[in-house]
């Protein structure tokens, strides 16, 4: 189903009169999936709406799976993030923490996710998580430094705490005290929006850098081709001359052969 969401936009030319939307995948757990909420109230849908209100052409796909750990996200990475994806918001680790999974396992999984995405030239925004106090200070330090370390080591964007301003706020959470209400999702989107805007800007800049060499190459070829044509015209026999000549251009270099070749 995720792949189908990208079929229609990809079928259109990149410059079909309007700017091609930046394709973002929100890869996460139930916090991304929108457990207990209608689809249009989930984080990806609300973020897309907020970014579009800012005048940014984006499409945000919901790749959240309830109960997923960082290792689970890694296992489904390839099919959850299809070809054509420009950016990924990685929101994973909450279930690792709630289950008391060794932070070294979580770190290794998230590190591999970031590595594989950056290898595919996909821009990453890493959304961090905090450990519950009852897990102890040692666990908390080992867990919470995962996100800042990965962001610093890999040059990816970081939003330190996905539930910032929402965690432990009863009015912004459902009865389980863990999953945001629609109002809670709105609060998350408002706080993460500046980082999401930066994510889109990074994608646009990366696209400009990749297009610039191609434009320069084709521009140089056009100039060389025109120059070659003019020089070829200069070597043509004048009326009344018995000389015969051939001029051939190889990447802008003229090879001339007169009389017999």
Image: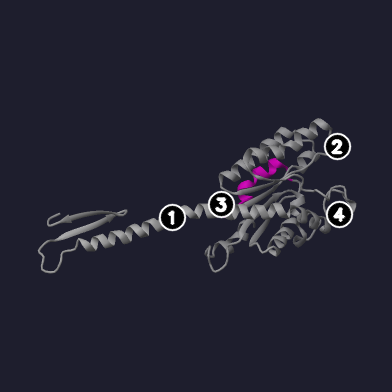
1 vs 3, front mark: 1
In this orientation, does residue 160 appear? yes
2 vs 3, front mark: 3
Q: In the rendered view of the protein, which quadrant contains the N terminus? A: bottom right
Q: In the rendered view of the protein, which quadrant contains the C terminus? A: bottom left
Label 3 residue SS: helix
Q: Earlier in the sequence, mark 1 or mark 2?
A: 2
Q: Residue 170 at what x, y percent from top left?
A: 90, 51
Q: CA distance from mark 1 to mark 2?
A: 56 Å
Q: Earlier in the sequence, mark 1 or mark 3?
A: 3
Residue where numbered disc 4 is placed? 172
* CB contact under 8 Å: marks 2 and 3: no
Residue where numbered disc 3 is placed? 206
Q: Earlier in the sequence, mark 2 or mark 3?
A: 2
Q: Residue 208 at what x, y percent from top left?
A: 53, 55
Q: Residues within 10 Å of mark 3 (few under 14, many from 20)?
A: some
For residue 133, the mark is: 2
- Residue 45 versus residue 226: which sits nearer the camera? 226
Residue where numbered disc 1 is placed? 216
1 vs 2, front mark: 1
- Residue 49 versus residue 38: which sits nearer the camera? 49
Q: Residue 7: which quarter of the image? A: bottom right
Q: Residues within 10 Å of mark 2 (few under 14, many from 20)?
A: few
């Amino acid at each position: 189903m995720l792949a189908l969401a990208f079929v229609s936009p990809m079928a259109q030319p990149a410059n079909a009169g309007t700017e091609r939307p930046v394709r973002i995948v929100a890869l996460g757990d139930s916090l991304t999936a929108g457990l207990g909420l209608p689809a249009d109230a989930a984080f990806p849908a609300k973020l897309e709406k907020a970014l579009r209100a800012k005048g940014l052409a984006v499409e945000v796909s919901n790749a959240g799976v309830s109960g997923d750990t960082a290792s689970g996200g890694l296992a489904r990475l390839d099919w959850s993030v299809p070809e054509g994806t420009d950016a990924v918001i990685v929101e994973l680790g909450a279930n690792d923490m709630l289950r008391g999974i060794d932070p070294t396992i979580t770190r290794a999984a998230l590190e591999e996710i970031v590595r594989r995405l950056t290898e595919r030239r996909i821009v990453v925004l890493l959304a961090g998580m905090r450990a519950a106090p009852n897990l102890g200070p040692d666990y908390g330090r080992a867990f919470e430094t995962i996100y800042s370390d990965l962001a610093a080591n890999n040059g990816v964007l970081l939003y330190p705490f996905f539930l910032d301003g929402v965690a432990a706020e009863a009015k912004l959470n459902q009865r389980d005290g863990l999953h945001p209400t629609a109002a809670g999702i709105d609060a998350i989107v408002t706080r993460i929006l500046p980082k999401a805007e930066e994510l889109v800007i990074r994608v646009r800049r990366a696209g400009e850098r990749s297009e610039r060499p191609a434009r320069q190459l084709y521009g140089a070829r056009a100039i060389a081709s025109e120059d070659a044509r003019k020089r070829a015209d200069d070597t043509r026999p004048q009326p009344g001359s018995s000389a015969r000549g051939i001029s051939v251009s190889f990447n802008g270099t003229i090879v001339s052969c007169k009389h017999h070749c």
